[in-house]
Amino acid sequence: MPPGAIVRALVFDKALLDKIRAEFPRAAHDRHGRERIFMDNGTGSLVAGRAARAESDARIDRSANVGAVFSESKDAEEIILEGRKAVADLLNAPSHEAVVSGESATSLLFSLSHAMGRDFSGRENIVTTDYEHYANVSPWMELEKQGAVREVRFARLDRDDGTLDMDHLASLVDEKTRVVAVTAASNVLGTKSPLGEIRKIARSSDAYFVVDAVHHAPHGPIDVQAIDCDFLVFSGYKLFSSHGSFLYGKEDLLKTLRPYKVAPAPDDPPHKWEWGSRDQSMFAAIGGVVDHLTWLADEIGDSYEEPLTQYSGRPRCLKVAMNAIEDYGRYLSGLVLAGGNGFPGLRQMSHVKIYGISDLGRLEERDPTFAFKLENVPDQEVVQRLWIRHGIALRADDYYSRVPRLYGVSTMIRASLVHYNTPEEVGKLLNAVDELSKS
């Protein structure tokens, strides 16, 4: 593993990891008191205590709907406003009015695709990729079914390492391309998309640039101004919060696009994009996550060496926390692949097939999410035995992704790690997988 990654990861020493795990009430034990290792974070992370408490307080003490003169209603309005500001700071968005909330990333992307499709002629095309979650596929395919666009095109993968074929992606974009929609990171392979390169390709045809950041959000910093995307979506329940999702959009586009809405709804963003009453507890919960990350930045203090001078205030704190989380994720990724401290890595297990990047010199190109299979042991049997014998919680699925079928399989086993997972947990997982692979 690259020495630099190890040095940076030492910001997360055992004392800090113990404090981080204390921030998550179910990090070590489930509600039945069973000690377990939670590695199903890609499906939905554990909830931060600050988020859960904020959500509960908002639901109980500020449950009134907005728009009234009494205090509970005003309090609900304040929570929603503060939640938007928290998301804006997390994404480094220029304004909280660029933050739209919704039921899910799927619903937000469907709303966005329909709004765009109302202005298309049926001659256009949309470009996406072969490692998307279907939340970032079906909304665009629906436009093709309706005749709003001529076709949806898929950039292929390099099957050896699970990365995008960028030459192929560029060849798909032409003067009729109106949308380029990509995931920030594959929810199965962990591969990060080169968003800067893709943005340039999208801009060459004046296409909308849409980013699905649902999987990447808990793993590293997001700066929508630096990415220069037109839209970006992420989900709270993948980021230590409650269900519900958020969409960032450039304000001029949020104003000019025409989403479906009820007639009396406001005509200005973000409200014209939001269906029904807002759930103030969802905004409170995401505010609690931002509070957790701000706390983490304070705990890290001066031990994180990158100056990040382009940010100030809470946005800088959030970037410190998320950069440190990303560094720690690379450290865990190195352990998963190469092993250490007496346990083998996946690369050393001859009966284990790894999907995605396994080169230790390319850890910066992936999030700590690993898809794999054991020879001659069905996926469901593997995850069941890991749970029953070792208390390791993960799953085998297709994860609503195009990836498994591209590799000719129906499911893959996935271990997805976040910053409350520990090197010791990684060691237990790897020893257990090694034992199973030899059985």
Image (cartoon, grey):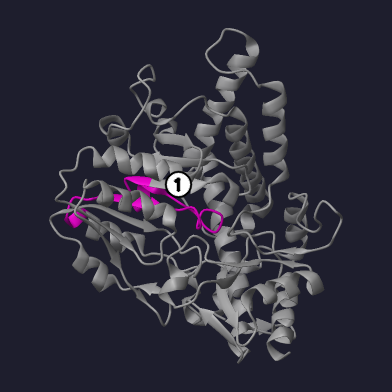
Depth order, front residue of 214/413:
413
Depth order, front residue of 134/44:
134
Q: Where residue 187 sits in the image (x, y, percent)?
A: 50, 63
- Tell whether position 204 is magenta: yes
The residue tagged 1 is: 106
Q: Is the residue 73 above or below the residue 153 in the image?
A: above
Element at label 1: helix
Q: Name the residue at 41% across, 26% down.
A: 271
Screen quadrant of the C terminus: bottom right
Local packing at callout 1 (Cα closer than 10 Å; few below 14, some 14-19, many 20+) is: many
Q: Name the residue at 62% across, 71% down.
A: 332
Screen quadrant of the N terminus: bottom right
User: In the image, what residue type sits under mark 1?
Assistant: Thr
Would you identify the image quadrant in which residue 171 lies?
A: bottom left
- Tell whether position 412 is magenta: no
Q: Where residue 40 sits in the image (x, y, percent)?
A: 64, 62
Depth order, front residue of 370/362:
370
Is any atom of residue 92 visible in this view?
no
- Name the outermost residue toward the top: 69
Left or right, 259 with reference to 79: left
Q: Is the residue 119 above or below the residue 220 in the image?
A: above
Q: Where residue 228 sits in the image (x, y, percent)?
A: 32, 49
Q: Where residue 361 sits in the image (x, y, percent)?
A: 48, 80
Is any atom of residue 308 visible in this view?
yes
Q: Name the residue at 19% across, 43% down.
A: 120
Look at the image and give the residue range highlighted in magenta: 203-231
Q: Is the residue 189 above or below the residue 106 in the image?
A: below
